[in-house]
Image: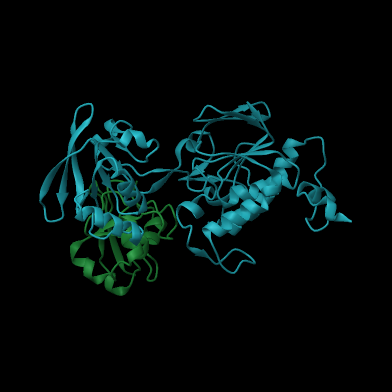
Chain colours: A cyan, B green
Amino acid sequence: MIKTDVVIIGAGPVGLFAVHQLGIKGLKVEVIDNLDKAGGQCIELYPEKPIYDIPAIPECTGKELTNNLLKQISPFQTNFHYNERVDEVTQDKEYWIVKTNKKKTFIASSIIIAGGVGSFEPRKLALKEADKFEGKSVFYSVKNKDMFENKSISIFGGGDSALDWALELSKTSKITLLHRRNEFRGAPHTLSEIRKLEEKGKVLIKTPCQLTSIDGDKNIKSIEIKYENGKIEKIETDIILSFFGLVMKLGPIAEWGLNMNKKTILVNTNNFQTNKAGIFAVGDICTYPGKLKLILSGFHEVALASVECFKRARPNEKYRFEFTTSSKNIHERLGLEKKDD
Amino acid sequence: MPKITFIENSGNKKTIDIEKGLSVMEGAIQNNIPGIDADCGGSMACATCHVYVEEKWIDKIPKAEEAEVDMVDMAYEPKKNSRLSCQIIIVDELDGLVVTTPEKQT
């Protein structure tokens, strides 16, 4: 069991700034995120898109914002638990117990939910029969390349993941790349490499088509695809790899007994606490009258929530508001004490 | 105000007035139309406001930008008449528009 002051769920921009606001108050935090890295939607949905409404930063991309936030919180040496989803939240007197899908357990006086629109998960194939083959012959990511050697692999998708894996796995397997339209949106260089392999007969490209059925018992034997003109084709296939991006799923958050409005959590605007004392919600996942889903709103929300987190973590100390420009305590926590003369 | 009709996958129909200048997605969210999630809030980053546009209206809507077509790849069961409703802006010419929502968005 990991004991800490605050568990932060979500490592998007608001979750990262929560680390800062709690860190300058001297609180210990642990951060959990279902993705394999920090940044949330900023990194997963629009890493290269410029953002123009971060105060005092005229223009920055999602990636730059994330990197700057990581730099800003680097003095606090925070533990990040990536690729983990919080499944269970239970109360033990004044503490909260948090359990993840990887069987890690945390105990903390407060939880800050900065979960955006929920956790990111791969978008599954629409075809229902795909479910029973998932993890055996239908995959949404490649974790261990060895499993994909000397096979007939049908890869669905038109983006970089589909193209990159078609290229890589064509070294050891027979690849068919399938996409719903003729244009691919992956990197032009990768595409031209694949077109070369197609000319050599090493990769088959089938467009514009969609998957209509999967045939097999334990393992897949073949798939059927339908072209836009109605023509149907059967393709011998051992493995389906599908790359249709990520979707956001609220997931277990809905079961923690919090007052919700659709997919958002109701909070008060004094300290962004939910209906459960010690559980806070900030950023896109929280709602209150006038709520705007802006990164800057999330920064404000977490600053206020962190004060209440302090009071809960240090019930015998008085909270003193301090400025980062002048506070010796904060400078020490930021590792600046030597410059303080 | 232009009237827009949403047909659910189950066949249920609902017609609402949407103010000019709003997107079909915004109109749907404000009127609690089921079947439109709009997780990303209209930044063209999620494909969960996906709709099928009735054939006769397709040419009356400005063609999808490349970024939208790329995003439609990610939608649940995209078809030729698939659009992201956050990118359809209501104008007088779209009075009477009919769109169908997919079985689900993710």
Task: Find residue A327 and report its horizontal and vertical position in percent.
Answer: 83, 53
How many discs mark residues in the rendered view? 0
- From what the image shows, is residue A224 above or below residue A321? above
Q: Is residue A67 left or right of residue A324?
A: left
Q: Residue at x 23, y 29 (%)?
A: A219
Q: Residue furthest bottom?
A: B92
* Residue at 62%, 51% in the rendered image: A70
Quarter of the image holding residue A54? bottom right
Residue A242, percent from left and from top: 30, 44
In the current view of this chain or complex, which residue is farthest to the right? A341
Q: Nearer the viewer, residue A128 or A151?
A: A151
From this viewpoint, which residue is outermost toward the left? A231
Name the side, left or right, on which A213 lies relative to A69: left
Q: Is residue A59 above or below residue A246?
A: below
The N terminus of chain B, quarter of image:
bottom left
Nearer to the camera, B25 or A36: A36
Q: Quick check: A80 left or right of B15?
A: right
